[in-house]
Image (tube, grey):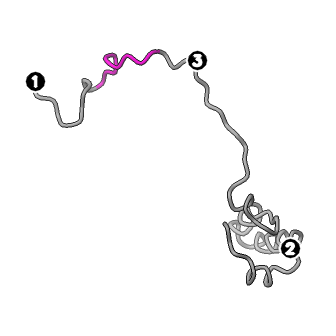
C-alpha cells in the first residue's frame, strides 16, 4: 500500500508510536508579568489600563485614571520613553 507523503502512521491509530504513557505529566501554569509590564521603566500597570480601555465608554476614563496613578506626566513619558514594550 502506498502511503501519502509525510504520513507514517495509519490514519486513526497511534499505537505504532511507542512513546509510553503521558499520564504522569501535568500542565504547569506560571503566573508572570507580561513583557510590557515587566519592561516599563515607569512601572505602569499597562495590562490593567489596556483592559479598561478595551471596554470603551467609562473604561477610557478608568484607563486614564490608572495611568495617572502610576505616572502623573504620561505625555512627557511618551516623548522620552524608549518603548521597550
Nearer to the camera, 84 or 8: 84
Cα distance in 3D space between marks 2 and 1: 69 Å
Which region shows up in magenta? 12-20
How many C-alpha atoms fall within 10 Å of the one at disc 1: few (<14), some, or many (≥20)? few
> What residue did someone put label 1 on?
1
**Mark 2: secondary structure:** loop
Q: Residue at x 89, y 70 (%)?
A: 69
Q: Nearer the viewer, mark 2 or mark 1?
A: 2
Residue 37 drawn above or below residue 25: below
Local packing at callout 2 (Cα closer than 10 Å; few below 14, some 14-19, many 20+) is some
Question: Is residue 14 rendered magenta in the image?
Answer: yes
- Give the quarter of the image for residue 75: bottom right
Residue underneath mark 3: 24
- Principal SS element in the magenta part? loop
Q: Quadrant of the N terminus?
A: top left
Check disc 2 and report the residue beneath it: 71
Q: Position of residue 74 (x, y in %)?
A: 81, 79
Tell me how far mark 1 sits from mark 3, CA to CA: 37 Å
Q: Magenta span has 52? A: no
Q: Secondary structure at mark 1?
A: loop
Name the element at disc 3.
loop
Q: Compared to 23, does 7 lie above or below?
A: below
Q: Which residue is painted at 69% across and 75% down in the image?
A: 82
Residue 85 in the image: state x and y as whole percent: 66, 66
Q: Earlier in the sequence, mark 2 or mark 1?
A: 1
Q: Which of the two discs, 3 and 2, labels the residue nearer the N terminus?
A: 3
In the picture shown, does residue 11 fall above or below 29?
A: above
Residue drawn at x 85%, y 81% is 73
Give the percent coordinates (x, y) of residue 77: 79, 79
Q: Nearer the viewer, residue 61 or 44?
A: 44
Amino acid at each position: 500500500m502506498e502511503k501519502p507523503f509525510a504520513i507514517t502512521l495509519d490514519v486513526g491509530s497511534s499505537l505504532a508510536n511507542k512513546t509510553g504513557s503521558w499520564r504522569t505529566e501535568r500542565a504547569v501554569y506560571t503566573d508572570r508579568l507580561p513583557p510590557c509590564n515587566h519592561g516599563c521603566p515607569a512601572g505602569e500597570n499597562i495590562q490593567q489600563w489596556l483592559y479598561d480601555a478595551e471596554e470603551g465608554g467609562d473604561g477610557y476614563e478608568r484607563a486614564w485614571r490608572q495611568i495617572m496613578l502610576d505616572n502623573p506626566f504620561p505625555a512627557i513619558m511618551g516623548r522620552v520613553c524608549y518603548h521597550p514594550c
